[in-house]
Image (tube, rainbow, N blue to C red):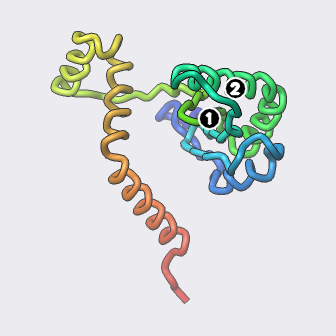
Amino acid sequence: MGRGWRGRGGWQQTEVPPADDAAAWFAGRLPDGWFTEAPTVTVDREEILLVGELPPLEGEFADDAARSAAESGRISRFREETRDERIEIARQAEHRYQRKVSWGARLGGTQELFTTVSAPVMTRLRQPERLVLDTLVDSGVARSRSEALAWAVRLVGEHADTWLGELRDAMSKVDDLRAKGPDLG
C-alpha cells in the first residue's frame, strides 16, 4: 500500500490519496457516544491515528494510582467492546485513504494507543551522527541505533513543537498557492 515498482529506480513511494477530509469522514462514520468530543485525527503517509476522549469516570478513588488504574481499565474495556466495529470502520477508511488506521483513547490523565504502525525509515548518517546514536546505546538510553534515532526524533518533537507547527502551517500555505497556480487569463 502506497509503494510500487517504478522501473530502473526500484521501489519508490507512490502517491496516496489526500486525507484532508479524514477528520470529517470519521466524525460522520463513528457511532454516537463513543467519545465525548470529536476525536483527534493525525495523518501521515502511512497511517491515520484517531484518538478520542472517553466519558469521565464516576466515583472516588483512594489516590492517583487507583484513578490511573481505573482509567486504564476503562480504556481496555472500550478497546474490547468496540473491537469489531473499529475493525470495520478501519477497513473502510483504509480503502478510502490507502493508509493503515490506528486507534487510541484518552481518559483523564491516561492515554493509550492500540495497533499503531511502526514504519521503517532508511537514512544515511555520517560518523558524527552515528557516534551520537552509539552514545545513546552505550549509555543504556536505547537498545539499538534504531531505538536511539526514534528517541532523538521524539525529543526534537517535544522541544520544537512550536517551530514544527509553524513549519507545517507554512507548508500548508505553499500547497494552497501551488493549487491556485498563476493567473494566466
In this view, the residue in front, 11 or 152, is: 152
Q: From the viewer's perspective, is 34 left or right of 118?
A: right
Q: Position of residue 33 (x, y in %)?
A: 80, 43
Q: Position of residue 34 (x, y in %)?
A: 77, 40
Q: From the viewer's perspective, is 20 left or right of 175?
A: right
Q: Residues within 10 Å of mark 1 (few under 14, many from 20)?
A: many
In this view, the residue in front, 103 or 80, is: 80
- Residue to which mark 2 is pinned: 74
- Cα distance in 3D space between marks 2 and 1: 8 Å
- Badge 1 element: strand
| Quarter residue 87 falls in | top right
Amino acid type at image mark 2: Arg
Q: Position of residue 83 (x, y in %)?
A: 79, 26
Q: Look at the picture and state if 163 lies above or below 130.
A: below
Amino acid type at image mark 1: Leu
Q: Farthest left residue? A: 128
Instruction: Determine which of the numbered discs, if any, sits on residue 107 in the image.
Output: 1
Answer yes or no: do the residues labelled 2 and 1 have beta carbons within 8 Å?
yes
